[in-house]
Image (cartoon, grey):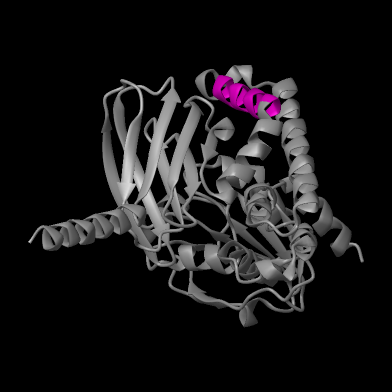
């Protein structure tokens, strides 16, 4: 009987030990973290779960998660203004430490990806901290974000990219290197740099999901690179007239993406009013894609305008589709397309757009 009890106890011990080993535990110990709700977002391919943590502000807290094939855990706090991403390579014990005010410098112990990224953060800690402090000053009092600070932010961004590139060159076989490419070089207007850095990585990383995502991203971005054929579309403007790429051929074409019509700063930034008056209609067509949703309201707004603006809005999801089709992730943004449908220019600068048109019209 005693042997039987001992055997059963041993079985139970093995069961609970194995079960315990399959659970991921993340201990978070951050200074300057105030009492608040923290959102723990677990993600994998096509799956996302969100846990809410009520943090009492009294030191560390621990998150446990059963196996689910999760790739990452992102902790959002301070009303989603700050976040920390943790990579979940396998069931493991992870410790997160640092200052909650500077998530870019947080150290994560547990798992090779986390620890290598922590090494990079430690090496760049001084400029990371300066970058965050400059941004925080700019957000709290915008007038402090003067020309000098903006220039310094640009310099720091460049320094971080240089250090990230050096890390990638030194660690071509590490998954952390692919993550740094994604974090520091994801620019649809500089796809060649992403391709060059991906070529540095060893072939063993080709199956890593971040590498696959980056290759898909560059493939899509090349669709709207300068020199590419402008993607085809077929939409209706606010007057119900159909517009397609075919109907716009044989003239230069400005495709301008803006926020809202009554927020005229975007239209002014692109100098669209000046451009549409400066060039003949038989040489240039301009189409504005706006996030407005009510065609009747917009027709009333522009009814007294001296020109009949060619505007496409989002009443039927048209704007969202066009934003995705043209890889637009910042507003305003304009594309200058030639008579054969080739993209000649991508810009948010109206002066550059007008000068380019003037040069083309003189030929």
| The quarter of the displayed image where residue 7 is located | bottom left
Q: Give the farthest residue toward the bottom.
A: 246
Q: Is residue 133 magenta?
A: yes
Left or right of 132, for residue 348: right
Write down the region rendered in magenta: 126-138
- Image height of 16 relative to 128, above or below: below
Please state if 49 lies on the left or on the right of 4 as rendered.
Answer: right
Q: Is residue 355 left or right of residue 43?
A: right
Total number of numbered discs in the rendering? 0
Which secondary structure class fits the magenta region best? helix
Q: Residue 53 at x, y = what percent?
A: 28, 37
Q: Quadrant of residue 36?
A: top left
Residue 286 locus on image (x, y percent): 64, 63
Residue sitting at 49 percent across and 44 percent down? 85
User: In front here: 4 or 100?
Assistant: 4
Q: Position of residue 363 (x, y in %)?
A: 92, 66
Nearer to the camera, 106 or 22? 22
Q: Residue at x 57, y 19 (%)?
A: 137
Is residue 268 visible from the viewing direction of this image?
no
Q: Position of residue 175 (x, y in %)?
A: 63, 57
Query: Does residue 361 show up magenta in the picture?
Result: no
Residue under the image location 69 percent in, 69 percent down: 204
| Quadrant that contains the N terminus | bottom left
Q: Is residue 167 left or right of residue 43?
A: right
Q: Nearer the viewer, residue 50 or 295?
A: 50
């Amino acid at each position: 009987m005693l042997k039987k009890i001992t055997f059963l106890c041993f079985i139970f011990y093995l069961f609970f030990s194995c079960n315990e080993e399959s659970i991921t535990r993340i201990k978070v110990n951050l200074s300057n973290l105030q009492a608040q709700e923290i959102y723990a977002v677990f993600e994998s391919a096509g799956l996302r779960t969100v846990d809410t943590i009520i943090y009492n502000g009294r030191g560390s807290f621990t998150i446990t998660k059963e196996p689910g094939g999760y790739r990452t855990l992102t902790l959002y706090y301070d009303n989603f203004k700050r976040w920390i991403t943790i990579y979940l390579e396998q069931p493991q014990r992870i410790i997160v430490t640092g200052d909650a005010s500077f998530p870019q410098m947080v150290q994560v112990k547990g798992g090779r990806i986390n620890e290598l990224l922590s090494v990079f953060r430690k090496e760049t800690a001084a400029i990371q901290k300066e970058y965050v402090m400059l941004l925080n000053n700019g957000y709290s009092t915008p007038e402090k974000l003067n020309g000098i600070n903006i220039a310094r932010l640009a310099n720091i961004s460049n320094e971080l990219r240089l250090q990230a590139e050096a890390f990638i060159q030194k660690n071509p076989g590490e998954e952390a290197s692919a993550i740094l490419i994604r974090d520091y070089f994801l620019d649809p207007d500089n796809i060649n740099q992403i391709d060059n850095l991906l070529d540095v990585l060893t072939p063993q990383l080709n199956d890593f999901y971040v590498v696959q995502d980056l290759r898909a991203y560059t493939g899509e971005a090349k669709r709207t690179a300068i020199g590419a054929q402008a993607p085809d579309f077929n939409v209706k403007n606010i007057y119900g007239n159909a517009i397609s790429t075919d109907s716009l051929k044989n003239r230069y074409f400005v495709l301008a993406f803006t926020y809202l019509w009554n927020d005229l700063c975007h239209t002014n930034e692109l100098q669209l009013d000046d451009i549409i008056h400066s060039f003949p209609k038989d040489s240039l067509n301009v189409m504005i894609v706006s996030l407005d949703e009510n065609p009747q309201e917009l027709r009333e707004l522009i009814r007294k305008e001296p020109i009949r603006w060619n505007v496409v809005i989002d009443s039927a999801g048209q704007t969202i589709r066009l934003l995705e089709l043209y890889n637009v992730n910042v507003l305003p943004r304009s594309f200058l397309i030639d008579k054969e449908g080739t993209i000649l220019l991508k810009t948010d600068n109206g002066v550059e757009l007008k000068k380019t048109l003037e040069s083309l019209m003189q030929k």
